[in-house]
Amino acid sequence: MPALEYVTLDFLSFLEEIISKNCETIKTRTAPLIKEIIETTAKTKEDLEKLYRKIVVAVIISSGLGNPTNIGVLKESTAALQSVFVPCFTAALQSVFVPCFTAALQSVFPPSELGQFMALSRKDKDQQIMELTHIVTGIRLFNRDCQKGGEGIDD
């Protein structure tokens, strides 16, 4: 069955090429927005709120999962960025669960961390946006799989 193996490898190569082109297209289209985010020098609370909204939109567009003009997609993506901290944990529960979620907790990006984001280098800001995109994408895909979200994600 070498012919079947060749067809399979050829098809996988074709898929890899399509995915690569799609990623490059998304990167090219989001580059101006990412550049604007990275170069922003927000000084007021209003500026920080605008910056946060731009980050949410950039994460949605970069993930390729939904339209940022869809209010449901915006709400779900914003919630994903803010969702990890659960203040109702008791101290006993925190001692059990928090060590398991430390990496996730540190990756979440609540609006209160915008000051820290602003202090990052350009390269680190770009990296942070990519990491946030991966995290939010994972949360939204998980929620979709659990039928508890995933609005705007096509099959």
Image: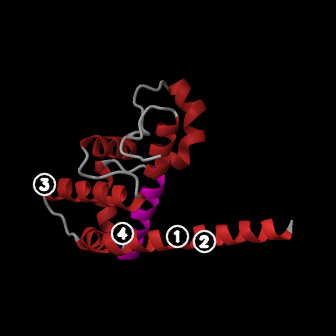
- Magenta stretch containing residue 21, yes or no? no
What kind of residue is marked 4? Answer: Leu
SS at mark 4? loop
- Gap in Å between the C-alphas at discs 3 and 4? 20 Å
Distance, label 3 to label 1, CA atoms, is 40 Å
The three-letter amino acid code for the residue at tag 3 is Glu
Pointer 3 or 4: first along the chain: 3
Residue 6 at x, y percent in the picture: 77, 72
Indicate which disc, 3 or 1, sits on the residue closer to the N terminus. Answer: 1
Check disc 1 and report its element: helix, strand or loop.
helix
Identify whether 8 is placed above or below 133: below
**Mark closest to the chain's N terminus, 2 or 4:** 2
- Name the residue beneath numbered marker 3: 46
Mark 2: amino acid: Phe
Q: Which mark is residue 18?
A: 1
Mark 2 or 4, closer to the camera: 2
The amino acid type of the residue labelled 1 equals Ile
The residue carrying mark 4 is: 120
Reading the image, the residue beneath label 2 is 14
Is 34 positioned to the left or the right of 3 in the image? left
Q: Give the extent of the magenta segment.
A: 122-135
Distance between mark 2 and mark 4 Cα atoms? 38 Å
Residues marked 2 and 1 touching at CB (< 8 Å)? yes
The tag earlier along the polypeptide, 1 or 4, is: 1
Q: Earlier in the sequence, mark 3 or mark 2?
A: 2
Q: Nearer the viewer, residue 140 or 92?
A: 140
Decide which of 108, 147 is in the foreground and name it. Answer: 147
Density class for disc 1 (Cα within 10 Å; few <14, some 14-19, many ≥20) is: few
Q: Residue visible at 34% across and 47% down?
A: 110
Indicate the position of residue 109 as horizontal and vertical percent values: 37, 51
| Relative to 101, 63 lies left or right | left
Q: How many marks?
A: 4
